[in-house]
Image (cartoon, rainbow, N blue to C red):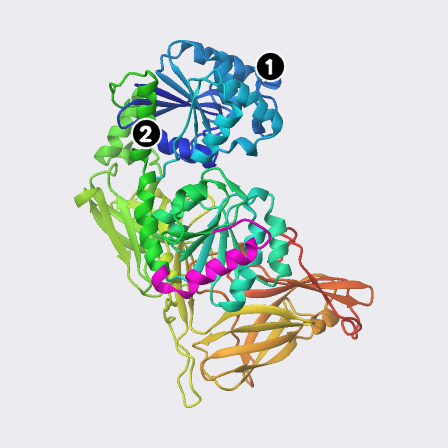
Amino acid sequence: MKIIFLLHNAYGIGGTIRATVNLATALAERHEVEIVSSYRPADRMRLPAGPGVRVRALVDLRPGARRYAGDDPGQSEPGVCCPHDVPYRGKLPPSRLLEDRLADFLRRTDADVVVATRPYLVCFLARHGGGSYLRVGQEHLTHGFHREEVRRDQDAAVADLDAFVTVSEGDARTYRAALPAARTRLTHIPNCCPAPEAEPSTGDSRTVVAAGRLMPVKRYERLVDAFAKVARQHPDWTLRIYGRGRREAALRRRIDELGLHDHVFLMGARTPIDAEWAKAAVAAVSSSTEAFGMTLVEAMRLGVPVVSTDCDHGPREILTHGEDGLLVPQGPQVEDGLADALCRLIENDAERRRMGEAARRNARRFLPGHVARQYEALFVDLGAPRDSRGPRTVRTPVGARERLGRWAERLGVARLLGKALPPLAVDCRAAADGTLAFRVPTTGLGRGRWELVLCPGKGTDGDELRLPFRTPAEGAVALMAVPPQPLPEGRWTVRLREGGRGGRTRTVSAGLVETAALLRPGARPRPGAAGGPDGPDGAAGPGCAAAVPYATDAGLLAVRTWNRPEHAELWTLTVEEDELVLTGSLHGAGAVGRDHRMTARLRGGGAEPVRARCRVDEAGMFLARLPAAELAARHPGGEAVWNVQLTPSGEEGRTVRPARLFGDVADRKRTDSFRQLVLPAAEGEVRVRPYLTVRNNLALEVTGPAAGPAAGRTARPAVVTEDDGEQGHAVR
């Protein structure tokens, strides 16, 4: 059968797009499947469809595109169907041009089934759908979640469809109760989730992970409140929240108010998310409602047990309480319930691992093939043809020049034609011992010798590292590794080079990047290239060398390295009245068990440094109390940066910058934040904001008017909890 899925913007990112792409890819193994996007604002889909799925757009909004329609008069006129749905308030509101083209498409298509994926499209399909095809609507939220006007429009449209599919049985019951006279088949089929490519979680990372858009319905504030209790009982555990949204600033304020900046981290968005779930020992869901709960399934299939609020509708249909996760009742004590459930799994390793194994096993029922068969059965039962036409082989029309270029690439002579090679996705996995393993697909590479090359970036003092291989390789992939040897500190771009040094290079995009091993207990950076001195006064051990692979903002594969013969790892930074209290561990600096000084020094000079005594114990652990009031008293005015340094007593020329290098994060300035102090000054106030630099070193940003020598001692300082962002900090 031929199946069409209607999406408003297939080139964006979100749960509806991901669920549709997964289902379409699974159905394309046996049927002819096409995704029709209302708009095309980008060249490529951020969540690409699998083989056999054709994708087309009705209105092309790419500037410079051959069929650009942004200047068409009809694009400036608003659409009229379901005018209260969310797209009308977004960047791509429905237009008269879109509605004309969508109506024409629905009249002309030879599909057997057309599936609409959101209220606007459901209403449009009900009003303009015709011909002999089945008209099927999908609900990716819930009946009660929609605004009243949207709910009214969609309820009226459902009666004109052949079937309407929700993602939970609870929501299907709600629709049946709301539409008792509808002759439409009202049923439920869950979303599907492909088998993960990442290595499953080991369950011992001491990390709780939550993921999803930072929006009110996710109720992340109460998860942060719950984790305040968890952190008091288990200070070595952390919470990571992945996602972006309008609640980010409010979440940051709450984290600062509770003093959880060393325990709760806002990690930003990640696509794909599998490698991040693999770092979790426990997953957490704090939503007030979940139509389905894709994040639950994503975590479960990586072997992670889930603690979730027992909210409508999805979690209670996905989780089995006590078997593969824990359900926490909604109510006024939900924060305590979440905290107690998290502590239960944190404190019981055997139960946590047992639930993780059950979660991985139970998540198989959401595999795409299983869900696709349920849709097939529904379509056939409604009258669609049972026979399969087989997946369509999608061929994009190309000219003779491009066909010649493709053949040249296969034969390994592309450079003779001056043809630029497209990026190739390469996987990378970091091991606990520091080894980086790369997996290069060789299909499409020219025959002969190739090299995977780590090229030093700007400011990185080192030679390129070359890893040779030949194609074709057995299994159509080439496996190679960078052994656990320290590389010079800096950033390294990964490239493919044909034929050795001087050959043509090919850009490498980030495939699956796995760094979960860097969070396992006992995983620490390797010794640096030159350790600290060993002597009768003792030594804290060798320095620090680490390598973290990551995807750049442009999606390219890169590696961040550190190599320091002496290192002070910053564990916590807290605010106590007018002091900044720092704790950490010293590596390779020697002289443990003796006095050091923690010094804040104005970058560029011009002010007397601020010093504080710092004791390093026999285990290399340090604690220092840096007087922030003295920073305010010596502040020259305006905006200034003070570098923080650790210096052994009597050795002024030997300094170590406190930094955060342990773990799996390449750029800590994006994820780690600290509370600020506001200190009274003679003419206003002085703010002291700790932050991590681009090299993950600790620094202090001090802003405000120049203060007198007595400033900061006249009143107790206030803690600033607002999120200042990154604006105006060019001095970094």
Question: Which residue is farthest bottom?
Answer: 536
Task: Please indicate whether residue 123 sits to the left or right of residue 503 in the image.
Answer: right
Identify which amino acid the numbered label 2 is placed on.
Gln
Please give the name of the residue rendered at 47% of the width and 58% of the height, measured from the top-left corner: 341
Give residue 454's position: percent from left, percent from top. 35, 53
Q: In the image, is residue 45 above or below residue 714?
A: above
Residue 304 on the magenta segment: no
Crowding near the residue tagged with mark 2, few <14, some 14–19, many ≥20 C-alpha atoms within 10 Å = some
Q: In the image, is residue 31 above or below residue 103?
A: below
Depth check: 424 or 402 in front?
424
Task: Please indicate whether residue 297 sits to the left or right of residue 32 in the image.
Answer: right
Q: Quadrant of the N terminus?
A: top left
Identify which amino acid the numbered label 1 is placed on.
Pro
Q: Quadrant of residue 252?
A: bottom right
Please give the name of the residue rendered at 74% of the width and 64% of the height, measured from the top-left corner: 686
Alpha carbon of mark 1 to alpha carbon of mark 2: how far?
A: 43 Å
The magenta segment is 328-351
Give residue 267's position: percent from left, percent from top. 50, 52
Q: In the image, is residue 652 above or below residue 253?
A: below
Crowding near the residue tagged with mark 1, few <14, some 14–19, many ≥20 C-alpha atoms within 10 Å = few
Please give the name of the residue rendered at 57% of the width and 26% of the height, measured from the top-left corner: 151
Provide the residue designation for mark 1.
Answer: 73
Q: Is residue 654 visible?
A: no
Give residue 146's position: percent from left, percent from top. 57, 31
Circle nearer the N terminus (1, 2): 1
Residue 337 on the magenta segment: yes
Question: Which residue is farthest left?
Answer: 474
Please give the name of the residue rendered at 47% of the width and 67% of the height, measured from the top-left corner: 236
Which mark identifies residue 374? 2
Dot 1 falls on a residue whose secondary structure is: helix
For marks 1 and 2, give the one nearer the viewer. Answer: 2
Magenta span: predominant SS is: helix
